[in-house]
Amino acid sequence: MDLLGSILNSMAKPPPVNEQQKKLLKKQQEDFQKKQDEERTKLKKFREDIESQINKFLQDDSQQKLTLQPMTKVQRSVVCISIGMKLPR
């Protein structure tokens, strides 16, 4: 342990973080968290809308097929999960 301790003590310490950098880091983390929450909320609303569209389609016997707007990969995966379809790998 003596050798390890001397090596660790001789290593350069990381530069100290001042208050301005701490505030900037905290603000960046808050902004990132806010964007994640917004994305999560948007995805939840999309899932609820798609599930209601699918349920209406399933209950209406006169419709033969359901046409959806073009979607991103994430949105398509939400639709696949909503209808119980296995996702392709």
Image: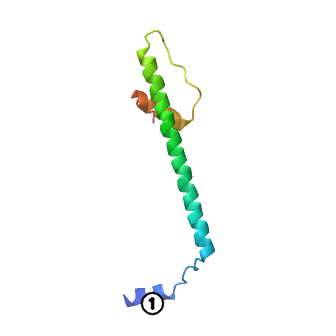
Quarter where residue 56 is shown: top left
Q: State which quarter of the image contains the N terminus.
A: bottom left
**Horizontal placement of 19 versus 63: left or right?**
right
Question: How far from the left and from the top, in percent, is residue 36?
Answer: 53, 50
15 and 11: which one is in front?
Answer: 15
Quarter where residue 32 is shown: bottom right
Q: State which quarter of the image contains the C terminus.
A: top left
Vertical comparison of 74 with 10: above or below: above
Callout count:
1
Instruction: Give the residue displayed 50% in from the left and 44% down from the top.
Output: 40
Vertical comparison of 15 with 59: above or below: below
Q: Residue extending furthest left?
A: 1
Question: How far from the left and from the top, in percent, is residue 78?
Answer: 47, 34
Residue type (three-letter) at the residue carrying disc 1: Ser
75 and 1: which one is in front?
Answer: 75
Q: Which element carries disc 1, helix, strand or loop?
A: helix
Question: How far from the left and from the top, in percent, is residue 50?
Answer: 48, 29
Instruction: Give the residue displayed 42% in from the left and 32% down from the top.
Output: 81
Question: How far from the left and from the top, in percent, is residue 88?
Answer: 45, 33
Q: Which residue is mark 1?
A: 6
Vertical comparison of 63 with 53: above or below: above
Instruction: Give the residue displayed 53% in from the left and 55% down from the top.
Output: 33
10 and 85: which one is in front?
Answer: 85
Vertical comparison of 71 with 57: above or below: below
